[in-house]
Image (cartoon, coloured by chain):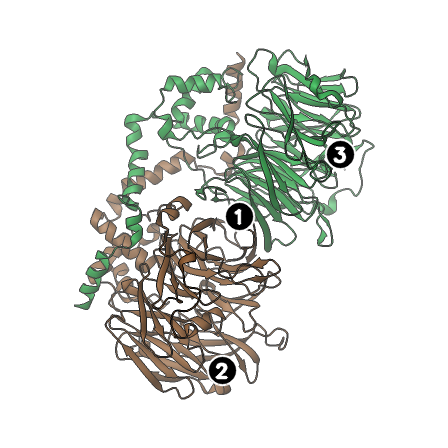
Chain colours: A brown, B green
Amino acid sequence: MRRVRASVHRLSQQPDWYKAFPGIHWLVLISLTFVLAGTAPAATAPTLSEKEMADAEFIYFDRCSGCHGALRKGATGPNIADEAMLKKPLSELETTIFEGTDAGMPGWGRTGELTTEESALMARYVQIPAPTPPEMGLKAMKATHKLYVPVADRPSKPQHKRDIENYFGVILRDVGQGAIIDGDTKELVSIHETGHAVHIFRASATGRYFYTIGRDGKVTLIDLYEKKPKVVAESRVCLDARSIEVSKYKGPKGDFVDKYALVGCYWPPQMVVLDGQTLEPIKVISTRSSTYDTNEYHPEPRVATIIASHHAPEWVVAIKETGMVWLVDYSDLNNLSMTQIATERFLHDGGFDATGRYLLIAANMRDQMVVVDTKERKFVTKFETGTKPHPGRGANWVDPEYGPVSATTHLGEGMIVVYGSDPEGHPEHAWKVVREEETGGPGLFLKTHPKSDYIWTDATLSKEEGANQQICVFKKADFAAGAHCWQAADHGKVVHFEYNKAGDEVWAAVWDKEGELIIYDDKTLKEKARIKADWLVTPTGKWNVYNTVHDIY
Amino acid sequence: MRRVRASVHRLSQQPDWYKAFPGIHWLVLISLTFVLAGTAPAATAPTLSEKEMADAEFIYFDRCSGCHGALRKGATGPNIADEAMLKKPLSELETTIFEGTDAGMPGWGRTGELTTEESALMARYVQIPAPTPPEMGLKAMKATHKLYVPVADRPSKPQHKRDIENYFGVILRDVGQGAIIDGDTKELVSIHETGHAVHIFRASATGRYFYTIGRDGKVTLIDLYEKKPKVVAESRVCLDARSIEVSKYKGPKGDFVDKYALVGCYWPPQMVVLDGQTLEPIKVISTRSSTYDTNEYHPEPRVATIIASHHAPEWVVAIKETGMVWLVDYSDLNNLSMTQIATERFLHDGGFDATGRYLLIAANMRDQMVVVDTKERKFVTKFETGTKPHPGRGANWVDPEYGPVSATTHLGEGMIVVYGSDPEGHPEHAWKVVREEETGGPGLFLKTHPKSDYIWTDATLSKEEGANQQICVFKKADFAAGAHCWQAADHGKVVHFEYNKAGDEVWAAVWDKEGELIIYDDKTLKEKARIKADWLVTPTGKWNVYNTVHDIY
């Protein structure tokens, strides 16, 4: 008898969490999801063939997920969940995809990346539920690890007379390659297979190696001591990735120079520590967590910028969707310390101020720049700049009126915003906007150098005919005079700047199938050289070894 | 023309992550999951009515998920995913559920908790896919927050003559209540509604408050200064929970005594910081992360033990499924530091050594005890004890031969294992098993007190007729003489011990609908009192305020 009574008693006493979610029954909810996914979309949402689905998934990964997220929850771009997209006519979606938006979305058809048919396919694709990509753990990563040249078999000194510190790593985006160019002679030194849509080159702390990270999560380690730079190791540690950084600390806590590399994944949402010399994957750190403000769980917090601290054995890691900056201590991976700093959403690009103490990073969906003190390990402040700030690593210089300043350009408008960044020497201007000037149009990057008289800006996202082929520079000594602009190319888009080691040359790219690298004299603003070659396919970012090692921008 | 070529080129160049997962196509995989969930189970797996599903979900939550996990991936109990369960005949599953296993699973039918029909229902339930419970973020938590008595309206000193430090909080599991008993007079002081299957009472750092946490995530704050203890605040911050701890630190970094409470959730997998005085939810910290060893993502890492550090403003938090101990610094919640220490899977109960420096915690699926140094913030060692160690907070005493030792009993066998825990004074025995003796059977808890001559053990999980009603004690001065045991009850199961403030009385519970509390003289082992009352329904754990505040065990 007791059994029966106990049972009746308990079942009539359902716990209060049932009451907390009235009308929601887990399994009903789940079943509904299955039903919607398996049946309902056939009636209301488009149906894609297996071939169309595979194509659409790849295009989404290649062109869309960077801004909208694998799960389509939005970040730099808005949330485009299928529920909302189903309410829009397909024709409207097709137009948006093909033509872009004023808010900064590229017109993928207009710029030649997608055909009309592909734009129409993507319009249908975003009306069906987002598939969840698979996980990737250490075992799967290790299966991809290839050590071509063991550390012991590598040369102990450079096998050539070139100046490694003036090497440039240049991305050849659409062919999944990276080129290394001798900055002194402008000669092509080598070309490497670097993973799909390789995103960045990062020089190691010693400057001996280049790390590259592909959008597909493939990491490549290139030894610059070799007569011809050689890929000595490879690993694939994400399904979608953007960032990589090396460990730089040497001090009382140990010598970590080039000991580890950290890869920031977009999917799975995690970061991965690798051996800096062999690329063997060592440790996975999940970024799945709650948003800094509403404290809601986010299933896809992606790693945006990573930058090695100058003050501690730490990586400074920006977690995009949650609006957190994590300081990840690499001095003891088995007893791993980190500090999770609440800032703003959604974090994107950033770099240090001139002293290397403050992280200055864009929360671009909130139109703000965020300041984090990496020495005191805490949030400092945030302030509005313009529509979707996007500084890359940023630009630091000394303004004649305001002292040390930093700046950002914007994805959403053609404006450079300058703000004080010297809280000790010029506290009255610190973290306050002191100057604003128009650029050639919405752009991706700006750059300067301590020895330069200028700040360089692109207008890559401009929709005005020819404007995205313009370069505009501002004179530090007379910033208020406004931009001096010129047409730098007659095809493609001009994007991204990098200085040479000496700080007297600026390199820009013509992002096109028939790509070019334009090299300017930074004093005269005159073109010194223009590299054109059949191997120069869709060049975008480019990094000088010396400037990358020393965070010079 | 370029558009077409670009497109063809790109689509034929699918990235390498396609190759890394040969034969796996995201959407195919996902669709397959939907198909399996929506259609295939109808053919091969059982079908449950909506009513059956609701009943089964609740029984699963109430009896099964604690050991097997909400997603059935296993922890203290094995993985029981539907794929594996579908391969077993229903009759076998029914028998296991009703009769239990030798590995420590209770026989839910045998002990009267489930009927034959319910056991059969659960056998069918585990053959269908596990539903994923919903998330719970800060907004939903705040909607449950109730502040009955603001801090300013609470009394500034006790409104009665009783000794609060000798209050006992007693769990009345099946009625979702907690009783407070005056340890001096043995009188019932108050009974409180505390959430479904309330799991623990935790005294605040000052001893003024009792916090209780229900299995349903309901937190209750009880003010012991009131003439009759009064619930002054409530919150619900999880859908499934086990643990709560208060902030105890006062020192150079600030005064955090009773400032915060931390709730450890089972689902959603997260911990939640609340205001210690009002229970207002403040911050959510996700535990979703990778396993310490294989570095595979785990979707449900649950918070097992939480214990406030004696060395820093930190909570020591055991993350069950990943095998990590997190030291969570509460001194700056917006710039939150933590140390994530790799130990062993799956972490369960634990407590401090006698000095308060070392966390001694069971990794019970690996039959090991783990040692973490909370002062140096690092893993020390781990070692095997017996089948599924389960120490509760543990037991610390001075062995005449081996010096300071600690001990654990086991879920899977009737054995107490004693190990050295004084690495400074007795390094030769530190973290080594020095004694093993049989207890009355597989049990849940052991307990001692610095003033006691004995160690008390239960045999709650024993299947032998009457054995689970036994108490066995060991004499510190003559441990090798073995257990002295006696029959303590003639019904129910005897479980869990707690000392009074003076350390000369031991309280045990008879876990039954007609529950009892038995109070022993710790010197003579004679029964001093036996509390029986109609309100004493299914008493299990009990906590003395003084001993809880001071981590005495």
Amino acid at the residue labelled 3: Tyr
Residue named by callout 3:
B546
How packed mark 3 is, by other alpha carbons closer than 10 Å (few <14, some 14-19, many 20 or more), is: many
Callout 2 secondary element: loop
Q: Using the image, name the chain to which the residue with label 1 belongs.
A: B
Image point (50%, 87%), residue name = A477
| Residue plotted at (37% across, 28% down) | B84
Image label count? 3
Q: Name the foreground residue: B254 vs A160.
A: A160
Res. A26 visible in picture: yes
Tell me how far mark 2 sits from mark 1, CA to CA: 51 Å
Mark 2 touches mark 1? (CB < 8 Å): no
Please give the label number shown on residue A451: 2
Q: Quick check: B116 above or below A458? A: above
- Is residue A488 among the parts visible in the rendering? no
Q: Determine which residue is flagged by label 1.
A: B139
Label 3 element class = helix
Q: Are the numbered discs 2 and 1 placed on the same chain, yes or no? A: no
* Alpha carbon separation for disc pair 3 and 1: 35 Å
> In this view of the protein, which residue sits in the foreground, A194 or A38?
A194
Q: Nearer the viewer, mark 3 or mark 1?
A: 3
> Considering depth in this image, is A155 or A375 the residue closer to the camera?
A155
> What kind of residue is marked 2?
Lys
Residue that extends furthest to the right in the rendered view of this protein: B161
